[in-house]
Image: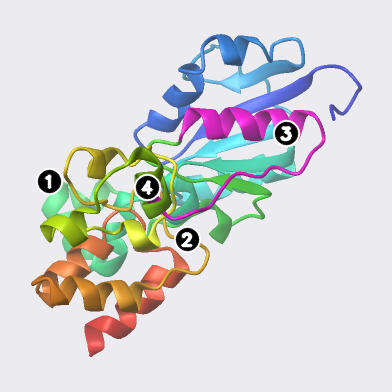
Amino acid sequence: MSRDGGKVKLAVFKFSSCSGCQDRLIDLGENLLSLTEKVEVAYFLEASSRTDPGPYDVALIEGSISTPHDVELVKEIRKNSRIVITIGTCAVYGGIQALRNWMNYQEVVKQVYPRPEWINSLEKSMPVSDYIKVDYQVSGCPVNELQLFNILKQVLTGRRPYHRLESLCQECKRRGNACVMVSRGIPCLGPIMVEGCGALCPSYGRGCYGCFGPMIDPKPDALAMRLEEIGLPKEEVIIRLRGFTSWSDPIRRFLERYERE
């Protein structure tokens, strides 16, 4: 799939994020090395000093778009890349930093920075797809490295990437976990969130926080009703749903309506 019939030129970029998803790519270790016969890493500041300006065959993008410079750069990446894949919840949904989208931007800046007049950022922290066409996306905080590896392999062999989008509840069942919400009354977002984390939190007796993002057709209305039934105040329901992926379309639309009720 390379432009010249040689190795596929891969670039990895970071915007507003913690670098955790890039680190997961490095964590692939030998699996990543197995791709070196087919892949040439042209730009990946987390792992290499090489900064090839492009064009690229595949660009992986981590992080949300939070500054005017981010907007310019991500559009340039799109122009220079045949395939763009967003990796991680920040790039796909806006991430934790999208919490500011629910607040007064000026007040947030004043609370965080001693010299807010020096800050040049956008009022909202947005997913990459709000600014450019994204070909494929892999959510997660951090992303599941094996899901990422499988998608890379599929792209390199010319196949359309695919990975399961079942709810976290299915992952709990495969691990033999008792449902924390049913058996212990612990609030859990698992019924409306996708798998990928290995059901990490429920496996340790905690409810899911939704770090991998919502399913394609989640039912936040039904989950909110259930959370209220087990004693969670409406304000706490809102706080939980505003966590990692509150700026995803289905969760945002629900919260906008739910808060007015």
Is 166 a magenta residue?
yes
- SS type, badge 2: loop
Decide: few, some or many residues near mark 4? Use Cα within 10 Å; few <14, some 14-19, many ≥20.
few
Decide: few, some or many residues near mark 1? Use Cα within 10 Å; few <14, some 14-19, many ≥20.
few
Q: What amino acid is at disc 1?
A: Pro
Report if the CB atoms under discs 3 and 2 are less than 8 Å apart: no
**Vertically, is 31 above or below 223?**
above
Q: Which residue: 24% across, 49% down?
A: 178
Q: Which residues are magenta?
A: 144-168
Q: Position of residue 205 (x, y in %)?
A: 16, 43
- SS type, badge 1: loop
- SS type, badge 4: helix
Name the residue that disc number 1 marks: 114
Query: Quick check: can you spot residue 17?
Result: yes
- Measured in 3D between alpha carbons, the distance from the residue under mark 3 to the one under mark 2, in whole angstroms, is 22 Å
Q: What amino acid is at disc 3?
A: Gln
Name the residue that disc number 2 marks: 215
Name the residue that disc number 3 marks: 154
Please tell me which of labels 3 and 1 falls first in the chain: 1
Q: Which residue: 38% across, 30% down?
A: 20
Name the residue that disc number 4 marks: 173
Screen quadrant of the C terminus: bottom left
- Measured in 3D between alpha carbons, the distance from the residue under mark 4 to the one under mark 3, in whole angstroms, is 28 Å
- Measured in 3D between alpha carbons, the distance from the residue under mark 1 to the one under mark 2, in whole angstroms, is 39 Å
- SS type, badge 3: helix
- Measured in 3D between alpha carbons, the distance from the residue under mark 2 to the one under mark 4, in whole angstroms, is 17 Å
Decide: few, some or many residues near mark 3? Use Cα within 10 Å; few <14, some 14-19, many ≥20.
some
Please tell me which of labels 2 and 4 falls first in the chain: 4
- Measured in 3D between alpha carbons, the distance from the residue under mark 4 to the one under mark 1, in whole angstroms, is 49 Å
